[in-house]
Image: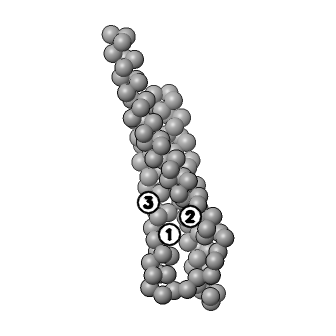
């Protein structure tokens, strides 16, 4: 693997980690908003988390497409870590989406009982 290819892979890994990390921050803010029944803020934070996940996926997909076109990469622990991190945080975001739905149902049920 040449220096440019190695640099590209490391750069992609760092981009994935950065976007995934930002997604986790927004996902946690969404979860905190849900806990205080602020669904507007939760949806906003979750939308930002989803956008960050999309950007991380773009960086990952570029490397995968390059490899499919014949670019050879050596194993890179950092890229492996980045992919693992992305998939973990993506799962967290998906779970929080479901929690928002669940909390909304509970909030509506509680509100209906109070009336």
* Label 1 secondary element: helix
Left or right: residue 46 compared with residue 73:
left
Q: Disc 2 versus disc 3: distance between alpha carbons?
A: 13 Å
Asked if the residue under mark 1 is in contact with the one under mark 2, i.e. CB atoms within 8 Å, the reply is yes
Point 54% across, 59% down: residue: 86
Q: Residues within 10 Å of mark 3 (few under 14, many from 20)?
A: some
Disc marking residue 72? none
Figure disc tally: 3
**Circle 2 is placed at which residue position?**
83
Asked if the residue under mark 3 is in contact with the one under mark 2, i.e. CB atoms within 8 Å, the reply is no
- Give 62 or 48, whichever is nearer the viewer: 62
x and y, in percent, of residue 46 in the image: 45, 45
Point 55% across, 86% down: residue: 72
107 shown above or below 16: above
Quarter holding residue 32: top right
Point 50% across, 50% down: residue: 91
105 shown above or below 9: above
Disc marking residue 60? 1
Pointer 3 or 1: first along the chain? 3
Question: From where the camera sits, is residue 9 visible?
Answer: yes
Q: Disc 3 versus disc 1: distance between alpha carbons?
A: 10 Å
Q: Disc 2 versus disc 1: distance between alpha carbons?
A: 7 Å
Pointer 2 or 1: first along the chain? 1
* Label 2 secondary element: helix
């Amino acid at each position: 693997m040449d220096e440019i290819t190695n640099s590209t892979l490391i750069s992609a890994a760092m981009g994935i980690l950065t976007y995934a990390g930002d997604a986790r921050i927004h996902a946690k803010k969404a979860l905190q908003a849900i806990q205080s029944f602020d669904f507007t803020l939760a949806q906003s934070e979750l939308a930002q988390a989803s956008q960050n996940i999309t950007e991380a996926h773009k960086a990952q997909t570029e490397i995968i497409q390059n490899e499919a076109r014949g670019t050879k990469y050596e194993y890179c622990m950092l890229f492996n870590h980045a992919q693992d991190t992305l998939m973990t945080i993506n799962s967290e975001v998906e779970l929080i989406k479901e929690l928002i739905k669940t909390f909304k149902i509970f909030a509506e049920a509680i509100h209906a009982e109070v009336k």
